[in-house]
Amino acid sequence: SDIFSMHIGMVGCCLDNSAADRRIAVSFCNYSMERTSHAWALKKCQSDIYTSGDLCDWTQVNSAWECREDLPENWFWTDKVDCTMKAKVNDDGMVAIVHDPILLTGVPGFEMKVDPRVHPDTINYFKVVWKDGSYPSPSNSCGNG
């Protein structure tokens, strides 16, 4: 299944999408740490009587304490559709998963961070089996893969 059908994000509905540099979303949850699919989050935002808003590429999320948006493992759905898995390969053919999202909070000192295990600078590589032992790597300009 694709990432948009998985129940991994929290709902953050934007009230006003006009100010691109300061979009504030409001989080709604039915219970603490609730995760939903992208479709459910979008439906909830568009049908909510308080926001009648939408998902957006927000800079700040405000919520009730029980939604716990302050925890680093909590992520909110946005209107971004470029959500693909990335990987990097070292010269030994080992692979590391990389997350490289744009992370903005609009609040200095509260910038969101990518987990070190999947940060673009990660050294958390694992072994994979390559067909015919041929793989892309930095030393061959990502060729032969």
Image (cartoon, helix red, strand yellow):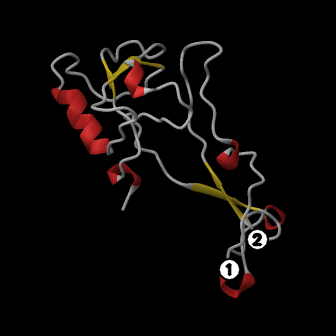
Q: Few, some or many C-alpha atoms within 10 Å of disc 1 (few <14, some 14-19, many ≥20)?
A: few
Q: Is residue 121 above or below residue 96?
A: above
Front-lying residue, 62 or 59? 62
Q: Is residue 11 left or right of residue 142?
A: left
Quarter residue 108 falls in: top right
| Residue named by callout 1 | 130
Q: Is residue 119 left or right of residue 52?
A: right
Quarter residue 10 falls in: top left
Looking at the rendered image, the quarter that the C terminus falls into is bottom right
Q: Is residue 52 left or right of residue 20?
A: left
Q: Residue at x 75, y 45 (%)?
A: 121
Q: Residue at x 54, y 15 (%)?
A: 106
Instruction: Check disc 1 and report its element: helix, strand or loop.
Output: loop
Quarter residue 53 falls in: top left
Q: Are marks 1 and 2 in contact (CB under 8 Å)?
A: yes
Label placed on residue 93: 2
**Residue 88 at x, y percent in the picture:** 69, 58
Label placed on residue 112: none
Instruction: Tell me the amino acid under the disc marked 1.
Output: Trp
Instruction: Tell me the amino acid under the disc marked 2.
Output: Gly
Front-lying residue, 139 or 34? 34
Q: Residue at x 23, y 18 (%)?
A: 51
**Residue 99 at x, y percent in the picture:** 60, 46
Q: Is residue 2 left or right of residue 141?
A: left
Residue at the extreme bottom: 132
Q: Is residue 69 above or below residue 90?
A: above
**Residue 39 at x, y percent in the picture:** 26, 43
Q: Is residue 106 above or below residue 116?
A: above
**Residue 104 at x, y percent in the picture:** 55, 24
Q: Few, some or many C-alpha atoms within 10 Å of disc 2 (few <14, some 14-19, many ≥20)?
A: many
Q: Residue at x 37, y 18 (%)?
A: 64
Q: Is residue 2 above or below residue 51?
A: below
